[in-house]
Amino acid sequence: MIDLHCHTLHSDGTDTPERLALLAEAAGLTALCLTDHDTLGGIPDFLAQQPKVEVRLLVGTELSCRFMGRSLHVLGLLVDPTDARFQDRLAELRGRREDRNRRMALRLAEVGCPVSLEEVQAEAETPLLSRVHFARALAAKGYVRRPQEAFERLIGDDGPAFVPREELSPGEAARWIREAGGVPVVAHPGRFAGGSFNWDEAMRDLQREGIEGLEGYYGEYRAAEQRYFTGLARRLGMVVTGGSDYHGGNKPGLRLGAGRGGLKVPDSLLEALEAQRDRGAWT
């Protein structure tokens, strides 16, 4: 079994890259792809574990896009970590994230829940701040009882303190990923727009923009969702991938490689993914 979607403390997870490699080995996985948001910062430490483990350690990232007025996440799987242009592009995305964080702190003050960026940073073990870290800071200051409540009441996509950041189009994300030698894949489509979205035509639109695959196996999917998305990928001739979306302590009860308990991503999906990559990156 493999896992092609997980996060470390370099974005919004809680484990180090080294620990993820060891957890994958302990779980008996044959391959693990690290996909932190907007960064390859954890990749050097992650790949440094390869001589110590049998599980294949693979390179990826997760980019946020704007699609149909909502945020859509696109995985860049098997990208080249030495690609300088891609690294520069990721740095630009992190700059956009920092601008959004400054504006979100101002918005929180306006709605009566002031929290400074220094207080948010105190809740993170990485310079890359996300809404997860805002949620922790809001809970630490007593504005909410638990971090999840911060998303429900304040900083979720429809919350009064939510601030969207300037995001890529799916076509831009696909081009960046392909130019870095990777494969662009829609992450957890079953969680888009609250999970009630009909993907039949929309996925065709994304395919025309350069998206080449979708996450048909996911750590929190129900069996019916898995059947639907794997079937949709087959009908469209798209690559199927799968992963737990492991975040360590930020997603309690969700295990690397196993999700909520029933996730089993077959090795054969990696073979198809590598074949798609080998058809050639854009120039």
Image (cartoon, rainbow, N blue to C red):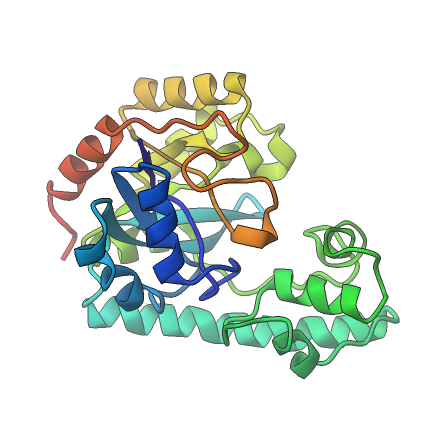
Residue ID at (51%, 22%): 225
Q: Outermost residue, left direction?
A: 279
Vertical placement of residue 231 versus 75, above or below: above
Q: Nearer the viewer, residue 58 or 100?
A: 58
3 vs 54, left or right, is right
Residue occupying image coordinates x 31% and y 53%? 60
**Where, by quadrant of the figure, is residue 207 drawn?**
top left
Q: Is residue 179 visible?
A: no
Q: Is residue 236 left or right of residue 80?
A: right
Q: Which quarter of the rendering shows the N terminus?
A: top left
Q: Visible in this render: residue 68?
A: yes
Q: How many marks can you see?
A: 0
Name the quadrant of the C terminus. Answer: bottom left
- Which of these two is toward me, 157 or 9? 9
> In x, y percent, where is residue 209?
34, 43
Residue 218 picture location, percent across and down: 46, 33
Q: Give the residue displayed 41% in from the left and 58% down from the top.
A: 36
Extreme right residue here?
112
Question: Would you place residue 121 above or below residue 249 in this image?
Answer: below
6 sits left or right of 71 in the view: left
Q: Which one is in front, 165 or 129? A: 129
| Rendered location of residue 276, percent (x, y) | 18, 37
Residue 12 at x, y percent in the picture: 53, 60
